[in-house]
């Protein structure tokens, strides 16, 4: 015998029944067929749990119906047009689809504390929040793109260009610490792999600008407080 998704069912014995007893041992009434719609991921998780418990899905649901509190959230049937799965069960009469899904959700929660099941309404709310954050991230990237410096043609050689790239008023208003701090602020923005405005050319010129400004500071200030602090 196999589950709807192709998982083999194992025979239930008294030794391996585990936490969930068989349908016979809980003293249920004669069973009738049920077809319970649910999300595919939920169906797969329920079938896997039944296999691990050494029983079939109907016995798992029958036992869970005795344990699940009524206020357990219903994972919810898929929306119209969404991908869906159908759990085929044999249970005593009188159970609605929502009650069966709640029971299986409680069984999964008891067996897998790390897995969080939620109602369809909450899942929809979280999806909406993700979409909002995605839109804001795109808007931020667009804004940064508009205000970002344009890579210069050729190699960066002028200190004033490097200072402007770092947002300094002129080439005499910073020290090495400020250059390093500013570089650490700008690098995550333009990093070609992880930056919000990923740009290999900007990142390369940012590194050139940092090296040019640090060399300028070390050359221009050969005496004074800065050189006394240098190791």
Image: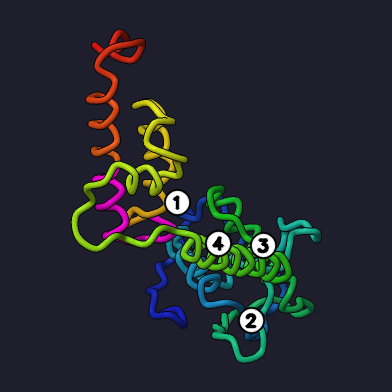
Determine the secondary structure under disc 1: loop
Query: Which sits earlier in the primary sequence, circle 4 or circle 1?
Result: 1
Query: Which sits earlier in the primary sequence, circle 4 or circle 3?
Result: 3
Q: Which residue position holds label 1?
A: 15
Q: State the residue at coordinates (34%, 27%).
A: 176
Foreground tag (1 vs 3)? 3
The spot of residue 53 in percent (x, y) is 47, 58
Q: Nearer the viewer, residue 25 or 17?
A: 17
Foreground tag (4 vs 1)? 4
Callout 4 touching callout 3 (CB < 8 Å): no
Foreground tag (2 vs 1)? 2
Q: Is residue 46 above or below residue 34?
A: above
Determine the secondary structure under disc 4: helix
Q: Residues within 10 Å of mark 2 (few under 14, many from 20)?
A: some
The image's mark for residue 118 is 3
Query: Which sits earlier in the primary sequence, circle 2 or circle 1?
Result: 1
Position of residue 125 in the picture relative to residue 59 (left or right): right
Q: Which residue position holds label 4?
A: 140
Foreground tag (4 vs 3)? 4
How far is mark 4 from mark 1, CA to CA? Answer: 59 Å
Position of residue 125 in the picture relative to residue 7 (left or right): right
Q: Residues within 10 Å of mark 3 (few under 14, many from 20)?
A: some
Q: Which residue position holds label 2?
A: 78
How far is mark 4 from mark 3, CA to CA? Answer: 31 Å
Image: magenta residue range: 195-209
How far is mark 2 from mark 1, CA to CA? Answer: 37 Å
Q: Nearer the viewer, residue 227 or 231?
A: 227
The spot of residue 172 in percent (x, y) is 39, 31
């Amino acid at each position: 015998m196999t589950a709807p998704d192709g998982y083999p069912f194992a025979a239930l014995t008294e030794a391996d029944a585990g936490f969930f007893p068989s349908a016979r041992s809980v003293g249920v009434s004669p069973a009738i067929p049920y077809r319970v719609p649910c999300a595919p991921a939920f169906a797969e998780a329920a079938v896997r749990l039944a296999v691990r418990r050494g029983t079939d899905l109907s016995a798992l649901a029958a036992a869970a119906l005795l344990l699940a509190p009524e206020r357990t959230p219903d994972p919810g049937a898929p929306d119209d047009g969404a991908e869906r799965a159908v759990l085929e069960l044999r249970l005593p009469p009188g159970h609605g689809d929502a009650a069966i899904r709640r029971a299986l959700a409680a069984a999964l929660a008891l067996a897998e504390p790390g897995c969080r099941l939620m109602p369809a309404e909450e899942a929809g709310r979280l999806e909406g929040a993700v979409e909002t954050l995605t839109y804001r991230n795109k808007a931020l990237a667009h804004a940064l793109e508009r205000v970002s410096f344009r890579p210069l043609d050729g190699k960066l050689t002028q200190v004033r260009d490097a200072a402007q790239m770092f947002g300094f008023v002129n080439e005499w208003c910073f020290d090495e610490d400020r250059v390093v701090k500013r570089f650490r602020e700008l690098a995550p923005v333009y990093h070609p792999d992880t930056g919000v405005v990923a740009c290999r050319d900007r990142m390369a010129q940012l590194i050139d600008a940092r090296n040019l400004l640090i060399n300028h500071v070390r050359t221009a200030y050969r005496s004074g407080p800065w050189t006394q602090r240098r190791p």
